[in-house]
Amino acid sequence: MEMKRIIACIAALVPGVMLYAQKPVDVHAHIILPEYKEMLRRHGAELEETFPLPGWDTERHAAFMDSAGIGCAVLTMPAPQPYYGNVEESAACIRWINEVSAKVKAGHPGRFRFCASLPLPDVDAAVREAVYALDTLGADGIKLATNSRGQYLGDEALDPLMEVLNERHAVVIIHPHRPSPCHEGIVRTTPLAMYEYPAETTRAVVNMLARNVLVRYPNLKVVVPHCGSFLPLAIPRMKSILPAMTANGSMQPIDWEGNLSRLYYDLAGNPTAEVIRALLAVTSPEHILYGSDYPYLPESVLRNNLNRLKETLAADGELAWYADLFLWGNASRLFGIKQENNF
C-alpha cells in the first residue's frame, strides 16, 4: 500500500507521468476459433452481429500483449451465440471452444485465463457445461451473453444456472449480443457496436437489478463491459422512479447496495476522464478493470488506447491514485492472478 501511495504522489506531482508496479490485466479479450467461424458460415450467420469477425491465434495475441506491455488476458467467446435450434450442435461447438481455451491457458502459464461459454438458451445444457468447465477444465469464470436468442439475463428460466454459478462463487463476464427483437432498418445504418451494444448491456443488467439477481445469488461477481455502458445514466433514473413503480405494483423493491456491490466494470472503449468519473458515481474504485476488446480493433489502435488510458489517469490528480487498481490490482484480486514486481 505504501508503494502505491508513493507512485500516486509522483503522478500527482508530475502530470503525464506514471509508474506501474505490475503489467495490466486485460479482462475483455476474445478467442475466435476457425471452427466457431465455420459453424456461423454454415448457418449464414457470419454477419449476424453486423460486422465480420476478426482473425485470432494464440501466438499473435501473445505477441500483441508483449508489445502493449499486458501481463495477462482473460479470454471469452465473442458474439453471436452459436445456437440455431440444435442443442447438440451448439453444445459441441461451445465445448470445443472451452477445451481449446483451457489448453491455451495451460500452454501459456500466467499469460491467459478464460471464462467459459455456455450453450444457452438450453438451461439444462448450460448447467452441464458450467459444471464441466468450472470443475474439470479449470475455467476462471463464465461468459454470459446479454441475451441468448431472446432469453435475457435476469430471466426466471436462468435461475437454476445462477444457483450453480452461485454455489461455485463464479465470476461472470457479460458481453452484448444482438438485441432481440432488433430493428433491422436501424442496424443497417448503424452497426450494433455503435449504439445497440451499450443499450443492450444496460437492458440486461437493468433486468438483473429489477429481479434482485445478485442479492439472491450473492456469491456471484459480474463484470459489465464497455465502461458500464449506459448504467451511470440509468441507475440514478431507476432510483428516482422506483418508489412510484413499487407504489403502483409495477415493480418490486430493489436492494441497490446488495446488487451494485457485486457489479464490476471494464474500461474497454477508450474512455475519457469524464466517462471514468461517471462510472465512479455508481461504483467504487475497487470495481473498475482494464479491458482492450482484442482483436476487434487494429493492434496499433489498442496499444494507443492503453497508452492514452495511462496518460488520462496520470494527468488527473484524483484518478492517478486508482491507476494501479484499474490496470491490474482489481483484476488480479478478482481472478486470483499473481504477478512479479517489475521494480
Image (cartoon, helix red, strand yellow):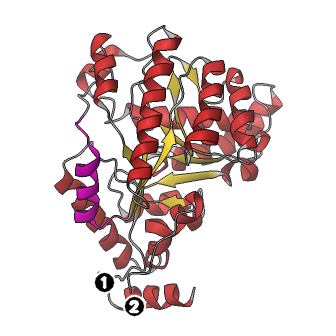
Give the amino acid at mark 1.
Val
Query: Which quadrant holds residue 9?
Result: bottom left
Instruction: Check residue 17 in the rendering and tell me which mark sits there, or answer none.
Output: 1
Prevalent SS, magenta region: helix
- Tell me what residue is drawn at x 47 percent, y 78 percent: 318
Give the amino acid at mark 2.
Ile
Q: Nearer the viewer, residue 165 or 11?
A: 165
Q: Magenta stretch?
A: 54-70
- Tell me what residue is drawn at x 40 percent, y 34 percent: 197
Q: Residue 6 magenta-drawn? A: no
The residue pinned by badge 2 equals 10
Q: Nearer the viewer, residue 179 or 281?
A: 179
Left or right, 263 with respect to 31, comes to: right
Q: Is residue 179 above or below residue 72?
A: above
Q: Quadrant of the C terminus?
A: bottom left
Q: Nearer the viewer, residue 311 or 104?
A: 104
Whether tag 1 and tag 2 are in contact, CB under 8 A, the answer is yes
